[in-house]
Image (cartoon, helix red, strand yellow):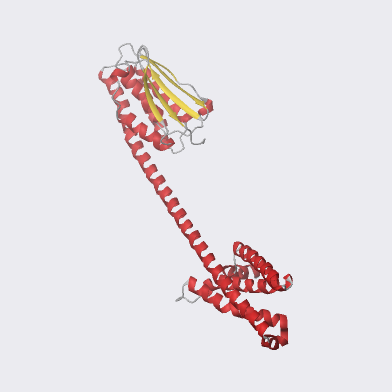
């Protein structure tokens, strides 16, 4: 068994494909039936001769390409093989059917004429089928080349998208970090007794959060944890001016979600909504999924949209990141809340779950 497998593998390039065999078989049946009706010769006799010639031509066509000399093209080798094999296969049918009487058989004008017609039919049949097959193979190669080009294009587009997302992530991370450190600096400068506690909380938060910021498989559940930790940190800085609500959202927890995307909105709500307000305010984070669409929101009761109408780097990059992550149908909408405040909504179609 170990010797037979390499032999079959070596012969495989010489053998016709299943599709080629089916096409030739169907053509042989049709020609045999037509010649049977036209000549009155029994169908089995006609089918035997036409089938033998068709099989020989099919094997010649298949074997010509791998066995051709290096200086000859594949198309030329196949056509030459058909031209050589067609008369030989026709003669072989006469030898097989007549045996030692083949020469006396061919001395008859009628039989010789029939044999010549068989040779011509074999040549025409073989050359036409060969050219059709080569045309079909050429179209298959063109389709395969086009598919390969499309796959390569998609691969390059994915690599470009990944590089773009990494660049945007690199811009957002220091933006978030510097804003948070500025808040701590303000506490230290004002001599607040909470400065040391807030700084220790910030260090603990960054130790837990920073290793996950570049996680390509980040989920909405981990993002909500970061949002909750950040708001707890901000609440320590201004306990009388900031209240917040961050739900668990268990139905959406495993949803793939770009790291720090929601945190950017929450940070903007603190910095541009709650901080400028003398009375402070409340931040509410929420989300829901309806008919396969997901909506997340961050709402604050801060100073309102009039004073926060100019988005910074974080918000601008967030729009690009979300569209690159979820597709062009993703939206980021800003709405003014009554009596004051801003509600930011993210609308997107989820990719998959982790």
* Percent position of residue 45, x then y: 72, 74
Residue 41 lies in what quarter of the image?
Answer: bottom right
Count of number-bearing discs: 0
- Can you say whether 3 is above or below 194 in the image? below
Residue 228 makes an appearance in the image? no
* Percent position of residue 128, x then y: 55, 69
Residue at horizontal 52 percent and vertical 62 percent from the top: 136
* Percent position of residue 184, x then y: 30, 23
- Can you say whether 334 is above or below 84 in the image? above
The front one of 303 and 144 is 144
Residue at horizontal 45 percent and vertical 55 percent from the top: 146
The front one of 233 and 285 is 285
Left or right of 32 in this view: 136: left
The front one of 109 and 96 is 109
Residue 62 lies in what quarter of the image?
Answer: bottom right
Quadrant where the image shows the N terminus: bottom right
- Can you say whether 190 is above or below 108 in the image? above
Left or right of 312 in this view: 100: right
* Percent position of residue 145, x then y: 45, 57
Residue 291 makes an appearance in the image? yes
Residue 93 lies in what quarter of the image?
Answer: bottom right
């Amino acid at each position: 068994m170990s010797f037979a497998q390499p032999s079959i593998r070596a012969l495989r390039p010489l053998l016709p494909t299943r599709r080629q065999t089916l096409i030739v078989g169907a053509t042989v049946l049709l020609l045999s039936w037509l010649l049977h009706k036209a000549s009155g010769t029994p169908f089995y006799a006609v089918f035997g001769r036409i089938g033998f010639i068709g099989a020989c031509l099919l094997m010649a066509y298949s074997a010509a390409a791998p066995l051709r000399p290096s200086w000859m093209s594949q198309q030329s080798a196949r056509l030459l093989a058909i031209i050589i094999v067609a008369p030989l296969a026709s003669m072989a049918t006469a030898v097989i059917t007549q045996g030692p009487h083949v020469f006396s058989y061919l001395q008859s004008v009628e039989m010789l004429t029939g044999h010549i017609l068989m040779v011509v039919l074999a040549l025409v049949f073989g050359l036409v089928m060969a050219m059709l097959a080569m045309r079909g193979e050429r179209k298959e190669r063109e389709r395969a080349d086009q598919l390969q080009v499309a796959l390569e294009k998609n691969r390059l587009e994915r690599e470009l998208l990944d590089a773009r997302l990494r660049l945007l992530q690199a811009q957002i991370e220091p933006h978030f970090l510097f804003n948070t450190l500025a808040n701590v600096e303000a506490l230290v400068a004002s001599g607040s007794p909470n400065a040391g506690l807030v700084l220790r909380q910030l260090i603990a938060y960054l130790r837990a959060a920073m290793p996950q910021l570049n996680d390509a498989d980040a989920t909405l559940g981990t993002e909500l944890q970061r949002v909750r930790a950040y708001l707890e940190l901000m609440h320590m800085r201004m306990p009388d001016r900031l209240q917040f609500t961050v739900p668990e959202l268990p139905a959406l927890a495993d949803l793939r979600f770009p790291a720090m995307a929601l945190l950017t909105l929450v940070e903007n709500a603190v910095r541009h909504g709650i901080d400028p307000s003398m009375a402070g305010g409340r931040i509410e984070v929420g989300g829901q999924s309806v008919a396969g669409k997901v909506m997340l929101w961050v709402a604050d009761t801060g100073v309102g949209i009039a004073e926060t109408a100019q988005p910074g780097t974080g918000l601008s990059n967030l729009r690009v990141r979300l569209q690159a992550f979820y597709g062009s149908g993703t939206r980021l909408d800003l709405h003014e809340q009554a009596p004051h405040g801003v509600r930011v909504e993210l609308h997107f179609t989820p990719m998959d779950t982790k």
